[in-house]
Image (tube, rainbow, N blue to C red):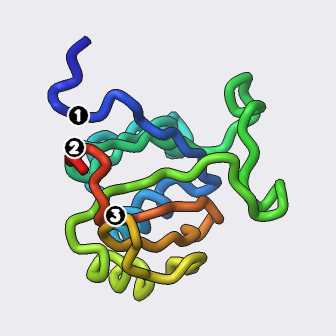
């Protein structure tokens, strides 16, 4: 299996307003557009955003067969069943960037006992994210 040094596990998210989500994720979290595909109505059918050698994919909420398996956070009491964890080199700067862009902070920035620092937040559509400087790939 070849994945060009990128992640072989890629979180997929759904947003009601795909274009606004892409703009916000790039501004607030530092993601970069890798690919964005629209349908004939101009809605985001599929997008790939990168951060370092990681990637997320997203599309707009739809009532198709796959979409029926996914609930948006505001449909289930603002909760999530998964949380994307992203390793960042300067966690404090990332936290400040996200907070100033309007991220709703869930767990404030803190130095962690196990090393590094981290924080968690919600994006504008309520998805939960965790950002931290602890790199689980590095030997303990």
Q: Residue 98: give x, y in percent of width and height.
A: 40, 78
* Residue at 46% across, 73% down: 119
Mark 2 — residue? 53
**Disc 1: which residue:** 6
Residue 78 falls in image quadrant: bottom right
Give the secondary structure at mark 2.
loop
Task: Work out whether residue 115 or residue 16 is closer to the camera in this orientation and state it.
Answer: 115
**Of tags 2 and 3, which is closer to the observer?**
2
Q: Where residue 32 appears, x then y in whole percent? A: 26, 55
The reply to whether the C-beta atoms of the residues labelled 2 and 1 are less than 8 Å apart is: yes
Are discs 2 and 3 less than 8 Å apart at CB? no
SS of the residue at dot 1? loop
Q: CA distance from mark 2 to mark 1?
A: 5 Å
Relative depth, front residue between 61 and 55: 55
Q: Which mark is residue 26?
A: 3
* Residue 65 picture quarter: top right
**3 with respect to 97 (left or right):** left
How far apart are the two marked residues, 3 and 1, measured between alpha carbons? 18 Å
Q: Secondary structure at mark 3?
A: helix
Q: Is residue 62 left or right of residue 96?
A: right
Answer few, some or many: residues within 10 Å of disc 2's Cα (few below 14, many 20 plus, some between 14 and 19): few
Q: Nearer the viewer, mark 3 or mark 1?
A: 1
Which of disc 3 and disc 2 is earlier in sequence?
3
User: Which residue is at 27% across, 81% downward?
Assistant: 93
For the N terminus, which image quadrant? top left
């Amino acid at each position: 299996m070849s994945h060009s040094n990128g992640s072989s596990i890629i979180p997929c998210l759904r947003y009601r307003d795909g274009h606004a989500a892409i703009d916000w994720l790039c501004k607030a979290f530092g993601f970069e557009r890798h690919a964005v595909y629209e349908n004939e109505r101009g809605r985001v059918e599929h997008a790939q955003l990168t951060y370092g050698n990681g990637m997320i994919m997203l599309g707009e909420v739809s009532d198709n067969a796959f979409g029926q398996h996914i609930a948006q956070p505001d449909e289930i009491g603002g909760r999530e069943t998964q949380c994307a964890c992203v390793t960042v080199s300067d966690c404090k700067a990332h936290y400040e960037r996200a907070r100033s862009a309007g991220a709703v902070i869930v767990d404030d920035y803190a130095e962690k006992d196990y090393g590094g620092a981290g924080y968690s937040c919600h994006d504008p559509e309520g998805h939960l994210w965790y950002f931290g400087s602890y790199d689980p790939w590095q030997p303990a």
